[in-house]
Amino acid sequence: MANDHIDITVEPGEVHALLGENGAGKSTLMNQLYGLLQPDEGEILVDGEPKVFRSPRDAIAAGIGMVHQHFMLVPVFTVAENIALGAEEVRGGPLGWLDRRRNKRDVLETSQRYGLPVDPDALVENLPVGAQQRVEIVKALTRDVDLLILDEPTAVLTPQETDELLAVMRSLADTGKSIVFITHKLREVKAIADRITVIRRGRTVVPSNHPAAAPNRTKGSVSPDTPTDELAALMVGRDVSLEVEKTPAEPGREVLKVSGLIVDDDRGVRAVDHVDLVVRSGEVLGIAGVQGNGQTELVEAIMGLREARAGAIELEEKSLTGRTTKQVLRAGVGYVPEDRSLDGVVKDFTVAENLVLDLYDRAPFGNSFALNPKAIAESARERVSQFDIRTPSSQSTVGTLSGGNQQKVVVAREMSRPLKLLIAAQPTRGVDVGSIEFIHNQIIHERDVGTAVLVVSSELDEVVGLADRIAVMYRGRILAIVSPDMPREEIGLLMAGVVTQEAEDTE
Amino acid sequence: MTTEAPEKKEEQKKEESFLGLFVHNLWSANTVTVTILSIFLALLIGAILIVVSDSAVLSTFSYFTARPSDALNASWDLISRAYADLFKGAIFDPAAVQAWFNGTGDWKTALNPLSETLTYAAPLVFTGLSVALAFRGGLFNIGGQGQAVIGCLTAGVAGFAIGLPAGLHLVVALAAGLIGGALWGFVPGLLKARTGAHEVITTIMLNYTATLFLGWLILQSGVQDPDRTDAVSKTIESTAGLPALPQPLRVHLGIVLAVIVTAGVAWLVNRSSFGFELRAVGANPPAAKTAGMSVGGTYIKLMVVAGGLAGLGGAVQVLGTADRLTGQVAGNIGFDGLLVALLGRNKPWGTLFAAILYGGLRAGGNLMQVDVGVSLELVTVLQALIVIFIAAPALVKTIFQLRDARTARLGASMAKGW
């Protein structure tokens, strides 16, 4: 059961945050509101009237709009065409032609009225992510919605873009629209929400001292004045530490040295542009940057998954350039890939099999000829308990586990052999708060035993929390290497490509 | 003793829950239930086709409203006779077995149906395993036919062109078939790994190439039987033939080989390092690549092994059942292998049983045609229907109102794979 007797009331003109871990049931709840799923029990009231939504069409007709986490835009269409899609202005009867001019006018009008600048003639595929999101919002607004649902809207944005979005949400609320803001980021919730509903395991949860019967409050929601750690505890169901606890780093010798690295992406566009990096043993180098600024290609080049056009990669003064992935792994590099379900695990494989995915042909798990199922099973049982992987058994398929536990499988696999270098890309993406804490501690533990660690993350909080030094990457270049003590606004500006005086000084 | 007691208790508990699970799963859409119901549905539709295709029975339907019993009796009689023949031809004829025990008949007649079934099944096991193994690695080996044809060809030529003592000659001929098929699998594997050429296209093209090559080769001097003018090769030396077991029956050593190879493939898939690689590559190539496996290298190795298996199937066909090469010597074993693999859910032992089922349908169909006059094509229709129902588990699920099972639906994914 994804939703268990949830009550939620959204008032006109309010920003209502829906807070919960991945898999808590937030999206299920909103998909019912948007007509994508039908509730088994209970009802939806719009302006006091019960409504039944069989499809998003019904929901839109009732004034409900939704901006999905993954944009529902056609990349090769223009902004105006995308916005018109599904509600085209047609002239001359059912077989008439599209009234493009009127579409464009509508788009411009909506965009000006709500202060959301979009170019109606631009192709969506050429727009940055933040602008694509504006298109989605304008699209919803042209449908005359009263309630706008935003599903994890900040996941793909820079800190600056996030601030802009929060401002837009506020101004929309001021015009009387209601906003449901789905997220798991506490900072944003604190910044914008008028009211917060916390969902855990399909139920709404409130603090134990919460006056649930208080007349001026809707049942199940909490006020934004609730302290952050209390909100986190509500989400997870126990106390969590949001700060990564660590001692100052004791950097040793140079382990990874990247110099003059140039890498192209799949389309042949330069993704990594003359990057120089050094990671020392016993330190965490964090790479901050908005997704798509070359971090993926940089890591793939180091791992031998992508060919470098030029430059050198050295591990303890031995060249890694031109090596196969297997050779790189064997040289003592651990790799937590950014796309867990695509690159990290084989979902049809058991937990035990996934734990030896890159070790199956080495003793004691096997040799180049045969596997040793007994050794594999035994080691799996150990890892499952050591890394607290919540699984019915080590023989369950990984696809049945939650995202956090799948990630623990990857982390357990990569950390269960002696490492010189650990590369963790987006180590906690799509991972619940409880597992984030655990994975962060494991990464710091690895640093403390003397491994060089490279952490790539588009979550600035994560980079700041883990790293001893932060390299900010923008359009394939390292703009600056800064200390994690630098103000987040400054780092945020760097992530947007703005080099400030202070950043230049530290470089 | 005291330590044993709680253990036993636990065991009992486990058994109970197992039984409970079994009953629960019996009517859920698991693979076994769907397979059995698919066969049942196919037989049901087959029954209608038998009635429709018989003009005598069909004529009784013209006065159905006046005397329905005529039509129903005639239909029932025809259907039951046809399916009884299918059974008698495939497994055993109770009358013949009775006669054998009474001393009036002999064991040969009694065991002949089984012998026929296994004879037809033997090559299908190999081609089925070829397809199943490739599929586990994420490849659609539509080229089982071509690989089997080349296997026939190389095994056949080795069978009559070289003189060796019995036993050794057989081994050499089988090896020739294996290598020939492996070579025919290597080409699409290499193309896939190096250029990304889709194996479905390349293997289909190589099927034509193989068949036409065989047709050309048979007519060449040194290969063609000098006493014949038609496209028939020389006769394969008896030293290279797969021995019958026992003599008067047609069933030969090939089926034993098939069981051994099935066990080998099962080991390869589940217990070997290469099997781990191929399963990882088949389930998620990017993850396999990220874990340091060579996806292209795995494709090449996999196609070589799959081709070798199909080639071995061709060799078994030519050295066991046929005794010379003809243009049609490989029959349809490669394409039937596709269906056998699907029916066997791409599992080695499943494929073995599916091949035996196919062999049984074929052997029973022969008797059905001779005895009741139901066309042998009906068997093909039955085979096709079974496959259709298995490929569409949702259909079977709806018809029988099965519960959802959480097992992986390999059959469906294979049908939807491309």
Image (tube, helix red, strand yellow):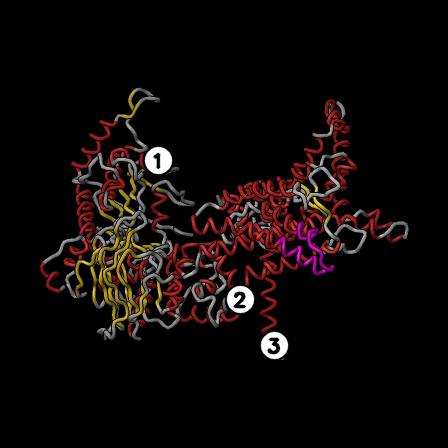
Question: CA gap, disc 1 to disc 3?
Answer: 64 Å
Report the front residue among B342 and A234: B342
Q: Quadrant of residue A23?
A: bottom left
SS label for mark 2: loop
Q: Is residue B207 left or right of residue B317?
A: left
Q: Is residue B245 left or right of residue B218?
A: right
> What residue would you read off at disc 1?
A58
Name the residue: 49% across, 51% down: B189
* Residue segment shown in magenta: B155-177
Residue A444 versus residue B48 in the image, above or below? below
> What residue would you read off at disc 2?
A370
Using the image, name the chain to which the residue with label 2 belongs: A
Residue A311 coordinates in the image, percent (x, y): 26, 60
Report the front residue among A154 and B146: B146
- Nearest-to-viewer mark from 2 and 3: 2
Report if the CB atoms under discs 1 and 2 are less than 8 Å apart: no
Report if the CB atoms under discs 1 and 3 are less than 8 Å apart: no
Using the image, name the chain to which the residue with label 1 belongs: A
Residue A159 coordinates in the image, percent (x, y): 20, 54
Mark 1 or mark 2, earlier in chain: 1
Question: CA gap, disc 1 to disc 2?
Answer: 58 Å
Q: For residue B174: magenta? A: yes
How packed mark 3 is, by other alpha carbons closer than 10 Å (few <14, some 14-19, many 20 or more), is few
Report the front residue among B409 and A222: B409
- Nearest-to-viewer mark from 1 and 2: 2
> What residue would you read off at disc 3?
B4
| Residue that lies at the very extreme toward the front in this rendered image | B221
Report the front residue among A208 and A23: A23
